[in-house]
Amino acid sequence: MAIVAQNGLSVQLTQHNVSLISITKQFPESGFSTVTEFNFNFHTAGQKYWHSSYFNPRIGYSVAFQQFGNKEVLGSGISVQPNIALQKRFSKGWSIESRTGLGVAFFNNPHDALTNPTNTVFGSVVTASFSESVSVHKTIKRLDIHAGVALWHWSNGHTSVPNVGGNFTGYSFGALYYLRDIKETRNSPNIWDTINKKIHIDIAASIGIHEIEGTFLPVDGPKYSVYTATIGATKRIGNVGKLTLGLDLNYYTAYHEQIVNQELFEADYRLNASNLVIFIGNEFLFGRLAFISHVGINVYTPFRKKIAETVQFKSNLAKTLYIYSTNKIGFRYYWSTDYQKINKRIYTEINLKTIFGKADLIQFKVGYNL
């Protein structure tokens, strides 16, 4: 998360309770599960142009300890997450809050083909960690008590197989204590008149990492690279929003190897190991940091069409989504704070690319707004 000037500080303890969601027949047993989370928060108060657009959000850094009721197979884990909370305040100290976190997790007993073959949930020591919660808060002087519902998800982004991933939904409760009072700034800066509102060109290059496609098999396989070139058109749609329409050209080394080894095509191996995606996306801007989400369609994907012929689908819709559906979520960091050149920025990005809702790869990107 971006480091911003703050005048409010707090510490927070939250307990999340329930059990893992069993989503496959090969899912190991799990009992009563808990996530115990410690959070250190910085409270915005209108100092930056984007604060008021998000109700003066709270930015936090948390450490969470996970237990899944089956130490022998699933073990335990620790998540480290930057997070942001959007809080709508009402009268008499009541408020409602939505909080999103994204970071990394570390597990002490991941899948191992010899010593722990039944752990299909966590395929590697290090995974991505995502959380989303909605809660009701009551503030009494410097103490804030809260209760709500939460979702946690852990996945390695298909960088190791198996990759079922852990999904945890349940209730949560906790308390927050203000170490320092918040003094809100009434006149937040307005940059809308300084933003270049024309359509601009975005170019980028990316490299992705994953194992060959499959949720359970093959295990302990090699890592493959995916190379991507992107071109798009971007336009600011507000102080904290940017819309993008673009094209991704992807080349999958894993596809190329399968095509050669299985003789799936007679010629043009590299062309058939590539795909072309048209996408529309949005950025939610938090100063230099942006949360990005893309919805795409594979308009050229010969390999996936060929593979789909060998897969049994529950419906034609499922087959269509398997072939053509592709999406991304992630974080982008801009390396400039010059508002006059807000559309002319170098940026770096990390995102998760999915196929039909299933993790495909972790992608690292460098781009430039012309």
Image (cartoon, rainbow, N blue to C red):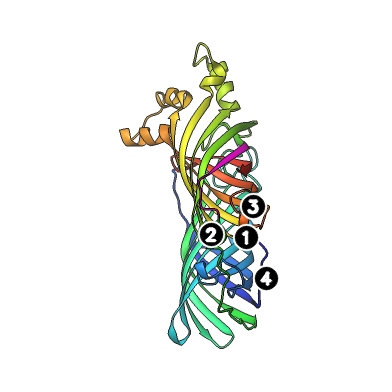
x, y percent for residue 15? 55, 70
Task: Label 1, secondary structure: give it.
Answer: strand
Viewer-proximal residue among 74 and 260: 260
Task: Name the residue type under label 3.
Answer: Tyr
Q: Residues within 10 Å of mark 1 (few under 14, many from 20)?
A: many
Magenta residue check for 113: no
The quadrant of the image that shows the N terminus is bottom right
What's the residue at 50%, 71% (across, down)? 55
x, y percent for residue 243? 48, 49
- Considering every residue shown, the one lying at the far front of the view is 193
- Asked whether residue 127 appears in the rendered view, the answer is yes
What's the magenta bit mostly, secondary-structure-wise?
strand
Q: Which residue is mark 4?
A: 5
The residue segment tinted magenta is 196-207
Q: Which residue is mark 1?
A: 81
Task: Label 4, secondary structure: give it.
Answer: loop
Query: Residues under labels 1 and 4: Cα distance?
Result: 20 Å
Task: Label 3, secondary structure: give it.
Answer: strand
- Asked whether residue 68 appears in the rendered view, the answer is no
